[in-house]
Image: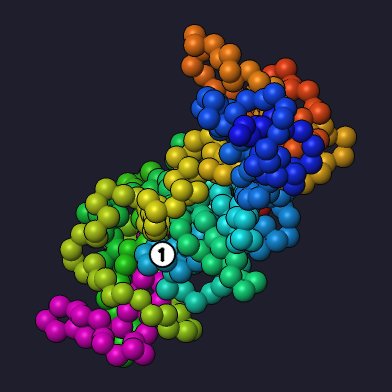
Amino acid sequence: MQYAAFYHGAPQNFFFLLLTPSPLRGLRLTEMNPLGTFVVLGLLVGVWSQTTVDLPPCDDPEVEHIALVARDYLNAQHNHGYKYDLNRIEKIKIVTSPNGEQTFVLEIDLLETDCHVFDPTPVANCTVRPKILTAVEGDCDVVLKRVNEAFTVVAFKCKTEESTEDLCLGCHTLLSLNDTTALDFVHASLATFNNNTLHETYTILEVGRMSSQVVSGGPAYTAEYVIIEANCTNGNCLPLSDPNAKQGICTAKGSRAAHNVDCKMFSTLVKQLIHVHGGSLPHQHGLKHHKLTALHNPDQNSHLSAESDESAEIVPNVPAVVNAAPVDAAPVVDAAPVVDAAAALDSSSASDSSSKEMPPLRFKRDVAAIMAEPAPAAQADPISPVQLCPGRIRFF
């Protein structure tokens, strides 16, 4: 008994026709070459199981909400340095699996603020550092899932670097966090602060940033560092183990011999890992700023690895339908050439052995409609409908 593999009509009838004995002269399944088999299986997958990829506008309110969730999560993982605020949403991709589970793949740009991670001030109330003071930028790829109407970060990867494009001659220049001369200035300014306090003595918990500026008479330093109440014996100061020990951040300006220092005490204590620099060098040898936590689960998440490597968008393994937000007067480009299923099966028996390439295939739910469409002359980007991304720039 022969089984006809020739197909026409609505997609829901395909499986029935495939398994029904037919007197039609067609290609038997046992005679299919790999291309024909691939087309048949692809049609089946396209009919019963689809993963959709949506590309909403980057400034969509829900997308902005997701980006702020990612920002807050990244700040919570950041144990040193300063909080970062959202500057721009570069890209958003929503992957919906056949079971309805949604994965949000986000690319965002962050900028360093003047609020230390130990400072309880909400990041929305913090000031982003201007470029002239050497802005520090974070480029992050974040993968989130929606669970019970709440967004949860499952993976991320960040790159942190300073922006030097707008620095001027004579501007403040960031120094390495282990610059010995600048650290001497930090300790001298802390000694000045301790001499002016009545009952408490403080030690350095962390140096946030140090910079210098060339002026007449020698370099002028600016330094920011976090302090904590300490118990000092013979010049050796250790942080108090009391959870209510006072903490704050100091800004010092000037030289080792002549400077002023102003310290802002935190109104609410924040739990943190005690990492005292004291007289030793900080752990960030040669670095001029504290980096965001670099990564979490990058090797176990295919979405993250593709985005982080800045490679071309990868279509999921199962056929995907891409939905982009409609734009007035903007033509929608079909994602890829569509292969006529019947033609592909008929031609499979006379395949050209000189050609080893398999044409790109895409399957949509309405197979009959697809078969009526002519293939475009040129192949487009696999997922290049009009995207309203990147989004607006909030700072610079």
Residue drawn at 88 percent across, 35 percent down: 329
Q: Nearer the viewer, residue 244 or 10?
A: 10
Looking at the picture, how far across and down is residue 117, in whole percent?
Answer: 44, 69
Furthest residue toward left: 234
Q: From this viewpoint, is residue 198 visible?
A: no
Tell me the quarter of the picture where residue 208 sits.
Answer: bottom left
Looking at the picture, how far across and down is residue 125, in whole percent?
Answer: 60, 69
Q: From this viewpoint, is residue 299 visible?
A: yes
- Residue labelled with disc 1: 78
Q: Magenta region: which residues?
A: 222-249
Placement of the N terminus among the 4 image quadrants: top right
Looking at the picture, how far across and down is residue 310, in whole percent?
Answer: 49, 38
Q: In the image, 18: left or right of 133?
A: right
In the image, residue 49 lies in the stretch drawn in magenta: no
Residue drawn at 29 percent across, 79 percent down: 202
Q: In the image, 280: left or right of 384?
A: left
Give the amino acid type for the residue marked by disc 1 in the picture: His
Q: Nearer the viewer, residue 207 or 124?
A: 124
Residue drawn at 39 percent across, 57 percent down: 297
Few, some or many C-alpha atoms within 10 Å of disc 1 (few <14, some 14-19, many ≥20)? Answer: some
